[in-house]
Image (cartoon, grey):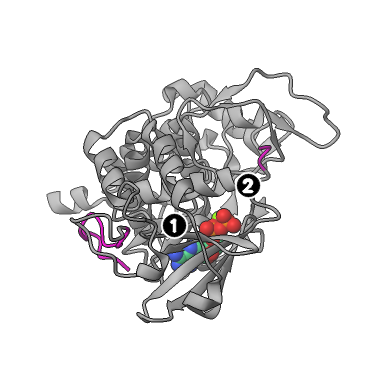
Amino acid sequence: MFSLWPLRVELCAGQGKALRSPRYVHPSCGSGCEQHTAVTPSASLHSPRTRCLKCSVEEMIELGLPDGSLIDELIVLTSQSLGQLEIQEHFNIIKEIGRGKYGKVLLVTHRFKGTPMALKVMPKTSTKLQGFLREYCISLHLSCHPCIVGLFGIAFQSSEHYCFAQELVIGRDLFAVIQPKVGIPELAAKRCAVQIASALEFIHSRGLVHRDVKPENILLLDHDCCQVKLADFGLAQKRGTLISFITGTLPYMAPELCKVALLEGQKEVTAPPLSVEPSLDTWAFGVLIFCILTGYFPWERCTDSDDCYQEFADWSSVGEDGNTEQDNPQLWNKFTPDAMELFRKLLAVDAEKRCAEGTVREYVMKAWLKKKNGMEQQTTAEKDKE
Ligand SMILES: Nc1ncnc2c1ncn2[C@@H]1O[C@H](COP(=O)(O)OP(=O)(O)O)[C@@H](O)[C@H]1O
Ligand SMILES: [Mg+2]
């Protein structure tokens, strides 16, 4: 068994708004746009001659292109107007509030306006400009969704860093509230799952794939997961992008992704390049639900050499009709048959057969965890019948 704690996991790749807030609260436009007013002129993205970035984003949303193609245009626009400024000249740094593999996140206030923000800061020494622009533009493009972290439309470079400003999410991240070997309460897990499913559906409808769904990248506005937001688009890509290899694996990675992983001692990958598809996020989402309900990872990686994964894959291959409850893989014994049915759909080993995240909504009224005495919990529907 792999206890979640204290293992925050990072991928080595080869390569508070209200839930129903208005579509855009961030003032991304500068003086060039008649429609929108700049609230933070010092860090405005636009000169009067450049095209208004906010309008471009809104245009994309209106067009709703499902192939993500307008992201490329947004990247070009942003690179043309990326300002140069030193962080401390424009922001008061209060403290560091988070750190990941690629950067750190600072709690800052705007020097003139006092607005608190979460500033994602990435060292130039380890960050390619193109990668930074892609993360920023994809985040901006998606930030209008209530379950995705908001952006202010402020991006700039200092002498040593690339930076962009995000809405400050005051709570902790989901990883921090998972009790090791226990998880979080079922109701909180369901609230979280429904919101993340909605965020992923939105991302996928825009022709993009997040590729790093995990508790560390889910920010909480409150301890009970009433409002959560998906963050960190550092690995996000357009659907259909080809990956020839990755280095290292994570428990959240789908089996088809693990096939293109260069493991220790390996020099090359034999599998053909993998197309980035929404089903990669669906798998990670299924693993995430397991993690938050148990406080464990279900396996270390989805490869033949991992017994826990193999046990699950064998169970899954027998099919719905062939399995009795007693056949459940050992680690999965605390789940009800309904929850196992959901896992079977989200974690279909064959990516083509994997369901969409929205399927989770069909299961939220059903019990996911067995009661302590071994009986499954009564569903709300059953209670209503009595
Ligand atoms: N907008 C935010 N508000 C508050 N905390 C944040 C915010 N964004 C990120 N964090 C914290 O910072 C950590 C690292 O941020 P993240 O964007 O995931 O960086 P990386 O790409 O390096 O993983 C997150 O796990 C979270 O704890
Ligand atoms: Mg992260």
Q: Is mark 1 within 8 Å of ligand 1?
A: no
In this view of the protein, which residue sits in the foreground, 187 or 144? 144
Q: Position of residue 378 (x, y in %)?
A: 28, 52
Q: Residue beneath label 2, please?
A: 128
What residue is shown at x 62% (from left), y 44% (from top)? 251
Depicted 143 relative to depicted 18: above or below = above
| Residue 266 seen from this side | yes
Q: Is mark 2 within 8 Å of ligand 1?
A: no
- The residues tagged by marks 1 and 2 sit, at their Cα atoms, a distance apart of 54 Å
Q: Would residue 195 appear left or right of 164 to someone viewing this image?
A: left
Local crowd at mark 1 within 10 Å, few (<14), some, or many (≥20)? few
| Residue 325 seen from this side | no
Q: Position of residue 199 (x, y in %)?
A: 35, 47
Does the magenta-highlighted stretch encompass residue 17? yes
In this view of the protein, which residue sits in the foreground, 65 or 54? 54
Depicted 190 relative to depicted 239: above or below = below
What residue is shown at x 59% (from left), y 38% (from top)? 253
- Per the image, label 1 sits on a secondary structure element best described as loop
Quadrant position of residue 222:
bottom left
Amino acid type of disc 1?
Answer: Asn
What residue is shown at x 65% (from left), y 39% (from top)? 308
Q: Position of residue 375 (x, y in %)?
A: 39, 51
Quadrant position of residue 15:
top right
Local crowd at mark 2 within 10 Å, few (<14), some, or many (≥20)? few
Q: Would residue 311 appear left or right of 283 to someone viewing this image?
A: right
Point out the stretch of residues depicted in magenta: 13-28
What residue is shown at x 43% (from left), y 78% (from top)? 109
Amino acid type of disc 2?
Answer: Lys
Q: Position of residue 26 (x, y in %)?
A: 30, 62
Q: Residue furthest front?
A: 49
Q: Residue beneath label 1, please?
A: 373
